[in-house]
Amino acid sequence: MIHCYQFDGLNIVLDCYSGSIHMVDKVAYDMIQWYETEPAEEVIEKAIAKHGITRDDAQECIADIDDLKTAGKLYAPDKYEHLAKDFRKKNIKIKALCLHVAHTCNLNCSYCFASQGKYHGERAIMSYEVGKRAIDFLIENSGFHKNLDIDFFGGEPLMNWDVCKQLVAYGREQEKIHNKNIRFTLTTNGVLLDDEVTEFANKEMHNVVLSLDGRKEVNDRFRVDYAGNGSYDRIVPNFQKFVAKRGNLSYYMRGTFTHYNIDFVNDIKQMLDLGFNELSMEPVVTDPSSPSAITKEDLPVVFEQYEELARLMVERYNEGRPFTFYHYMLDLTCGPCIYKRIAGCGSGTEYLAVTPWGDLYPCHQFVGDEAYKMGSIYDGVQNLELRDKFASCNAYSRPECKDCWAKLYCSGGCAANSYHASGDINGIYEMGCDIFRKRIECAIAVKLLTSGLEQPGQKEE
Amino acid sequence: MTRIVTVETRDLEKSAKEGGCGECQTSCQSACKTSCGVANQPCEQLSK
Ligand code: SF4
Ligand code: SF4
Ligand code: SF4
């Protein structure tokens, strides 16, 4: 399967199963597409007629295409379906936990999927004992994995900061005993992000995710405190101080865009103006009937925004002030292997969320939904049927993904989004797919436009 | 090859033999917490 598209004068051909990417001129762009289904002779005739090239020239192009085909870089067949069947099921080990250390929050963001941190339940705080047991549980069930990830999540984890720090200390002690490497991460709204937290985080946190929606009026539409006051003026200075001290360590400034700020590139620009340059901006996940939900009608604008963002990245790259956008970060040569590309996100199998009282859920997005409770850190994963269901979610498990060119970039989508949109974790969230495919097209275009490579035939025009 | 420039990418077929160690970060853990997508994840084996 191939996917061909154009971006600002680039003609791009993606070969789905080999992962190859080709930049081609207009003639090859047509010929490659025709040749997928038509015999060489016809393709040559059509190319001569449409592009006015010589027969020799057309034949040479066909020969080049044939060479790529032989090398397995064009029209490569799907050889991976069998890998998907048994990859997850045979040996499930846990390697990442999302610790809900505080089911409470000092902000009252109206779009919060966790309903202000409570996850449709009572406010709660994780005790040190529960957290400690969670770390033991992770290590006990991690098997061969050396690298383990633990995210302090909420609600707002800084509302239970002392416990977080104690848990880091405990983790550091245990990783040595068991020969593991634990990477801690923190997601925070910034209200309580002071010097002390900053210093600790810079020592111990592999990554820190900071929540800010961009422009003040956008941020303050949803990100308000219990008195209804916007949070922007309080959190931005905290974030700026934090980032100034972060040095080369990784962080993400993460925003959410909704129906109300569909022109989200303006929010990205605002983040850049504030001095942040590791950015992420996500479409809101919410009930489709909510007024903030992205609608089908919004999609053309959303697409255009992703293109504008790609241009902005290239422009800033050329000016020597590059920035990172999470979804456009592609490592073409050192990216994920085929197993990772088909295996899905790992929710419910290698990744689990832990509630303040120690219950296990497939991931943070399912917490609070009783039907998805999987067990607890004391008794382990009990609902094996549910685990198997999650284990079988992958790039090959959804009929909709079968003919989707993006499947090896996507690995079958987000189970939680699918569940919200279709009622089934093995369904799909169509709008999410449209957005995802657009993002990948733009991400690859940015890569090519900053690669120093030149597309053939570009000079002539 | 004048009309086609092939960009260097990881050979997926080959990665079926050498990959699958599972040491890389779980997708959702790394930054966004609301959606999957694996293409932007670095491979722990190769990107050292
Ligand atoms: S974009 Fe949608 S259809 Fe395509 S692989 Fe991902 S989930 Fe499947
Ligand atoms: S189901 Fe979605 S939200 Fe949950 S871990 Fe997977 S990608 Fe992330
Ligand atoms: S670290 Fe690399 S080889 Fe190992 S599973 Fe992840 S992507 Fe594959």
Image (spheres, rainbow, N blue to C red):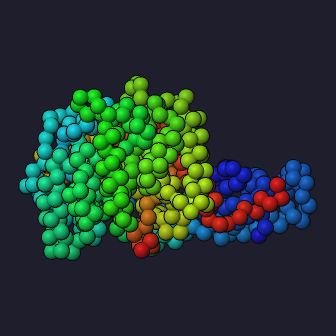
Placement of the C terminus of chain A among the 4 image quadrants: bottom right
Q: Is residue A419 left or right of residue A37?
A: left
Residue A16, position in %: x, y? 58, 57
Question: Which residue is at the front of the view, A34 or A19?
Answer: A19
Up/down of A153 relative to A56, above or below: above
Q: Residue furthest left?
A: A129
**Which residue is drawn at the image coordinates 51% and 54% (left, top)?**
A328
Q: Is residue A140 visible?
A: no
Residue at 56%, 41% (x, y): give it. Answer: A305
User: Is there any visible trace of residue A261 in the rendered image?
Assistant: yes
Would you identify the image quadrant in which residue A316 lies?
A: bottom right
Quadrant for the N terminus of chain A in the image: bottom right
Q: What x and y, as percent, mark residue B19? A: 43, 70
Q: Give whichever of A304, A409 is nearer the camera.
A: A304
Residue at 43% in and 53% down: A275
Name which residue lies at 31% across and 56% down. Answer: A242
Q: How many marks?
A: 0
| Rendered location of residue A446, percent (x, y) | 59, 56
Tell me which corner region of the image, top left, top right, bottom left or bottom right, holds residue A106: top left
A93 relative to A345 in the view: left or right: left
Picture layout, residue A71 above or below residue A368: below
Question: x%, y% of residue A332?
Answer: 54, 65
Residue A272 to residue B19: above or below = above
